[in-house]
Image: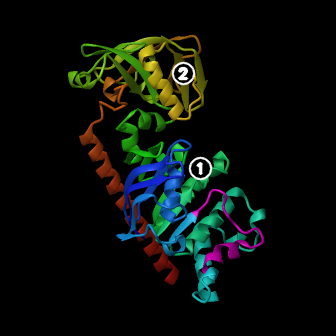
Amino acid sequence: MSQITLTNIVKKYGDGFPAVNDVSIDIKDGEFVILVGPSGCGKSTLLRMVVGLEDITSGDLEIDGKRVNDLAPRDRNLAMVFQNYALYPHLSVFENIAFPLRLDKGKHSDEEIRSKVNKASDVLELNEHLERKPGNLSGGQRQRVAMGRAIVRDADAFLFDEPLSNLDAKLRGQMRTEIARMQRRMGITTIYVTHDQTEAMTLGDRVAVLKKGVLQQIASPRELYEQPVNLFVAGFIGSPPMNFLPARVEGNTLHLPFVDVQVDQSIVDRLKGDMAVVGIRPEYLKDASLGDSMAGNAVRFTATVDQTEWLGNEQYAYIPYETDPSVQAKLDELDRELDGEGMRTQMIVNLDARSRVREGDEAELVFDPALMHVFDPETSECLTRNEEEASRIAQQSEDDRKRALERAKERDAREDAAAKN
C-alpha cells in the first residue's frame, strides 16, 4: 500500500495546450479515489502520468514521499488495468495472470507463481477458468483476469482506466461490486478513471471532478451531491441531473418559472447581478396530493406535466418552462461542458411510484427551499454551500472508510485462521 501525492501537476503537449492544468490531489494509503469528468477533461492523461506512460510537464508526483517524476513505469511498482483488458490470446488464464511474475526471470519459483496465481483466482472466482483462453471468456471474466494480473504483482497501488466501459449494463453493475469488494479486502490504494458518474458515486471514497484539465472539486460522493462548489459539479453529479432554473431577484425573493421563493439576504448580497440560477434535485420535488410530510416552510405550486415515465419503483415527470434569455447563454454553455445535446428546457420531477400524475395533468408539487442550491450565473459559484456541513460530511466519510478497511482486515484474519485449522 502507498500514499500518492500530486502537487501542481501540469501536462502540456506540443501546441502548448494544458491537457491537465495545476492539479493537486493527496491520496491516502488504502484510499479509493475516482477521477471523473466528461470526455477530454484530462482524467486519463492524469492517470497515465501517475503510472509513467505520460511525461509530467511540471509539478511533483510522489509515492510514499519519494519523487517519481523521472522513474520509468516498471520502477514505480504500480499495477494498471486497461479498458481493453490487454490479455494475450494465446495464453491460458493462468499464464495471463502469471505473466508479470515470469517477466522477473529467476525472481519467483514455479511454486511461488502458482501460489500467487491461485490466491488471486480465489479472490476473483476464476479457479474453474484457469486453463481456458481469453477468447472463450465473457467480458466480465476477461476483466477479472486483467485484475488478477494486477493483484499478483504485489503493487503499491492499482490504477484503473475505464475498465468497465466495454461491458453491458448488468455486467458493469456486477463488476463494480467485485472491484469494491476486492479493494476493501486488499486495502490497496486505488485510482480509478471513469466518465460514468454512477461508477464514481458507488465506488469512490473520494471523487475528483475534472473540467478541461482543471480540478473542480474533490470530495466524498455525498459531499459532491449535497454540497457542490459550482454549477459544473452540481450538474455532473446526479442521475437524473439537477434541475437548473432561472430566477430573477427582487429584494430577497427569487422569481422562478413556477413559483416565488424567499432566501436569506446574505445570499442575495453575494450575487453579481439581478439574476440567479436555482438548482433543485428531481427527488426533492414531491407530489403534494400524496400528503407526504414536508418542512413547515415548504413551497407549493402547480405546473402542467408534459410527459411521464413510470419505472415501477419511481416515476419521472417532465415539465417544460421558458427560460430567461439573460441566463440561457450560461445554461447552454454548461450543457455543452456536460456533453449535453442541447435538449429543451424542462424540469424533471422524481415522483413516488404511488403518484397518479400523468401527461397533461395540472400537478400540485411541493419542495423544501432549504434543499435548493443558488448559483451566481456569472461566477458559477454555489452561494448556498455550507462549509461546516461539508466538513462534517468529509469527516464522516473518512471515518466510514477506516471502519470498512478494519472490517476487511478482521474478516481476512478470521478466514486465514479458519484455513489453518
- Judge left or right: residue 5 versus residue 52: left
Residue picked out by circle 2: 317
The answer, for residue 64, to whether it is visible in the render is no
- Amino acid bearing label 1: Gly
Q: Is residue 150 visible?
A: yes
Q: Is residue 91 above or below residue 369?
A: below
Asked if the residues shown at circle 1 and circle 2 are in contact, with their CB atoms under 8 angstroms apart, the answer is no
Q: Position of residue 406 (x, y in %)?
A: 37, 66
Whether the magenta-drawn stretch holds residue 356 is answered as no
Q: Measure the C-alpha gap from mark 1 to mark 2.
A: 26 Å
Q: Is residue 99 magenta?
A: yes
- Of marks 1 and 2, which one's residue comes earlier in the chain? 1
Q: In the picture, residue 377 is in which quadrant? A: top left
Q: Quick check: 176 above or below 115?
A: above
Q: Hey, which quadrant is residue 402 in on the image?
A: bottom left
Coloration of the structure image: rainbow
Q: Position of residue 309 (x, y in %)?
A: 60, 25
Q: Which residues are magenta?
A: 81-101
Q: Tell me: 300 left or right of 110.
A: left
Give the crowd class for mark 2: few <14, some 14-19, many >=20 residues within 10 Å: many
The kind of residue on which mark 2 rests is: Ala
Q: Which mark is residue 173?
A: 1
Label tally: 2
Secondary structure of the residue carrying tag 2 is strand
Give the residue displayed 45% in from the left and 45% down from the top: 210
